[in-house]
Image (cartoon, rainbow, N blue to C red):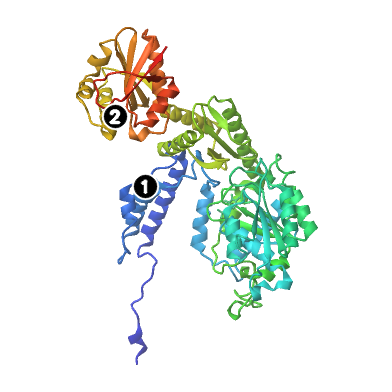
Amino acid sequence: MNPEDLRPIEETLDPAGWTDMRALGHKMIDDMIDYLQGLRDKPVWQKPTDTSKEVLNRSLPQEGQAPEEVYQEFLSYILPYNKGNIHPRFFAWVQGNGTPLGMLADMLASGMNPNTTIGDHAAMYVEQQVIEWSKEMFGFPEDASGLLVSGATMANLTALTVARNSLSDLQVRNRGANDKLTVYCSAETHICVIKATEVLGIGSERTRIVPVTDTFQIDMAALIAMIKADIAAGFRPFCVVGNAGTVNTGAIDPLEEIYQVCKQFGLWFHIDGAFGSLAKLTPTFAEKLKTIEKADSLAFDFHKWLHVPYESACVLIRDKKLHQAAFSSVPNYLTAHERGLAAGPEPLTNYGIELSRSFKALKVWMSLKEHGIQKYGRLVQQNLDQARYLEQKVLQTANLELLVPVSMNIVCFRFNDGKHSEEALNQMNKEILMRLHESGIAVPSYTLIHGKYAIRTNITNHRTRQEDLDLLLSSIMDIADSLLIRIIDFDTTNPAHFSAFKFINYAWINKYFKVEQGDIDSLENPEKYFLETGGAVLLACRGDEVLGTTALKPMGENSLELCKMGVSDAALGLGIGYAIGEAAIKKAKDLGATRVYLETNSSLSPALNLYKKLGFSKVENFTSPYARADVAMEMYL
Ligand SMILES: *Cc1c(COP(=O)(O)O)cnc(C)c1O
């Protein structure tokens, strides 16, 4: 056969027109730089529209589209609905902002696109250097080892694998996990640590959850007692995980004490320092976090408090030999050569689970060089100072309650005007948070502190200014204000008051009884029936929304009848009945009455209880125009 006949029609993924691709690339960079520059004036978050969700739910494209069109779809349906963690007023969860140079570094790394695993090429040396710098940052010994991973989740998993596999007599790599192994961590530990122990075959049951003190730090006495009890019961404790900054409140476990316990019992000391370990760069925490230098392993993120774009984190292991022993296994196709590309540094597969790895080291390397570690330290300190500022403002603001003293960069508080049950407060603070998110002004998150719904403001943000924290609090107060129930007088110039008065009462009466003629007269003409006769109509409102009604109707000498007490279904359980009843009694006094009278039905026991609580007592003999009335009550003022 003539080899010429085998000539294929060759395709490639490279552009047909490089000039157009270059122009598109320039436009993308301009657009993204504009986007980052104008961030402060954009909403933190916007709900993805139905159109954008529909576009993102279409089936697999069979044929291609022009890159410009694809980019246009990105601009229309994706970019506007960003999560928002790059924004100066993003305070939810512990997440970093990223930086412009970090963004560009990601582009460069993808352009080079080296699979950073083995071989004699620059990416391997960049990663090595980043590991060396990380060891220096945390005071790990020169002969320690490390690896860049996607997040602290993978860093914790990697470290715990080394810890488990370091029990050489068990030969875990050959025989699988031993069912006597136990590991210890506080109840405030990040869930990814528990997941890691599950993945490692230790299991969540043998991951002993140690209670915390009232400052959310691990209870050392309990830890020691649990270790001793496990040893006595034939278990084999092998590791304690200490927290340098818990995700809920930023609490730091007593690391030095944990270290001593680990020494005493011969256990591996791992620290989850995902974000908090970076506080070691500040004067405030340098001393408190010094014990990190003595840990057997440390997990920390670059993508949180150092703002390198996602994903970038690191695991450091004190004993390089144990690190290698946990993962190295070099098959034929990966063995190093003396020269050529297959030479070079030790394959990174010897230090972790993943084989193919991105060149994430580049964005870390460029970021650390751009800013220098001193500036990162100052930025972490700035966030710590901002958390203190916010704490003080919460303490000084009437109707805000601090739920935990601030230990680092997380401030947990809630709206509490002292007039609501715990349940109502939880409901209200959740509503405040959802409205705040929907407003796009600021995005804190939430947690439960001893059962109390907390607005949790986490500050790991190099873009936040003091004015952003002021705006956060003033917005919360405004929203809370709009949520409070107010009792107001019926306004005859407001049509919404007429319709709400009718709607709520017809619904209320229909739910339990039948509408009678007297209802129709009074509900259709409240102004004639109650107001022009010297009585009153009161409404319970939240913002402009009417949630409850009641009315006072003159009856004989100095007496007023309390009637048309109704609460909309949506507002049950908010204590509106009591509030509006109390307001009606006060109103009756203002109108000069000495007695308030009412009729109701004995089947409505919550209503009877409410009236009793308000101070009414039963009247024995009465006649009523209403068929449903079988109980009458009165109260002397
Ligand atoms: C964020 C966090 C983790 C998980 O880290 P990822 O980077 O999200 O995988 C673990 N522990 C703590 C304390 C964290 O804050």
Q: Earlier in the sequence, mark 2 or mark 1?
A: 1
Q: How many marks?
A: 2
Q: Is residue 83 left or right of residue 58?
A: right
Kindly tell me whether residue 212 is visible in this rendering. yes
Query: SS class of the residue under badge 2?
Result: helix
Q: Quadrant of residue 351?
A: bottom right
Q: Quadrant of residue 167?
A: bottom right
Q: In the displayed structure, would residue 376 be above or below residue 352? A: above
Kindly tell me whether residue 318 is visible in this rendering. no
Is the distance from the Cβ of mark 2 to the nearest ligand 1 atom less than 8 Å?
A: no
At label 2, the amino acid type is Ile
Query: SS class of the residue under badge 1?
Result: loop
Mark 2 or 1: the one toward you: 2
What quarter of the picture does the N terminus occupy?
bottom left
Q: CA distance from mark 2 to mark 1?
A: 35 Å
Q: Is residue 244 left or right of residue 526?
A: right
Q: Residues within 10 Å of mark 1 (few under 14, many from 20)?
A: some
- Outermost residue, right side: 264
Which residue does the image show at 26% across and 10% down from the upper left?
Answer: 533
- Outermost residue, front side: 621
